[in-house]
Amino acid sequence: MMLIPEWSLVALSVSAGVIAGAVFFGGLWWTVRRVAHVQRVALFLGASFALRAAVMLLALYFSCDNDIIRMAGFLVGFFVVRVIAVRRKGSVK
């Protein structure tokens, strides 16, 4: 059974997931808008993805401390931001 302080750590992990999701999907939106103005598109897209993925993985690593419940909380926060981002910006057709 989890104690109250452990639930606060789960809440912090959810918050970290929301922040990491905002950085990831905000960076993706920035990349999509800038890609038309770049000469080396593949390098730009690859570097953008690598940086966004590194930020997300570092946030996951430092916020979860090898606890599966905190990791699940982080991913819930991350995917909540994804759902919000897709609904706000719409799907690409």
Image (spheres, rainbow, N blue to C red):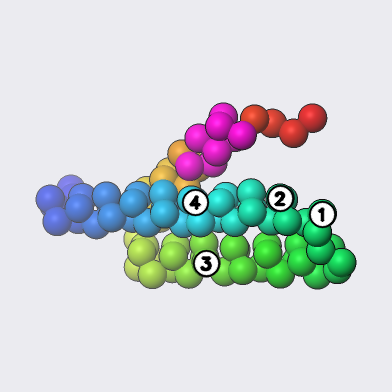
Q: Residue furthest left?
A: 4
The reply to whether discs 2 and 1 touch (Cβ–Cβ < 8 Å) is yes
75 on left or right of 65: right
Q: Amino acid at mark 2?
A: Arg
The residue drawn where x is 44% and y is 62% is: 60
Q: Is residue 77 magenta?
A: no
Residue 21 circle label: 4
Mark 2 closeness class: few <14, some 14–19, many ≥20 residues within 10 Å = few
Secondary structure of residue under mark 4: helix
Q: Which residue is mark 2?
A: 33
Residue 51 is situated, as x and y percent measured from the top left of the image, at 61, 68
Residue found at x 24% / y 57%: 9
At x 13%, y 52%, the residue is 3
Measured from the top left, where is residue 48 in percent x and y? 68, 64
Left or right, 3 with respect to 38, comes to left
| Rendered location of residue 75, percent (x, y) | 46, 49
Q: Amino acid at mark 3?
A: Val
Ranked by sequence position, the earlier of labels 1 and 3 is 1
Instruction: Answer left or right for 3 relative to 23.
Output: left
Label drawn at residue 36: 1
Mark 4 is on which residue type?
Gly
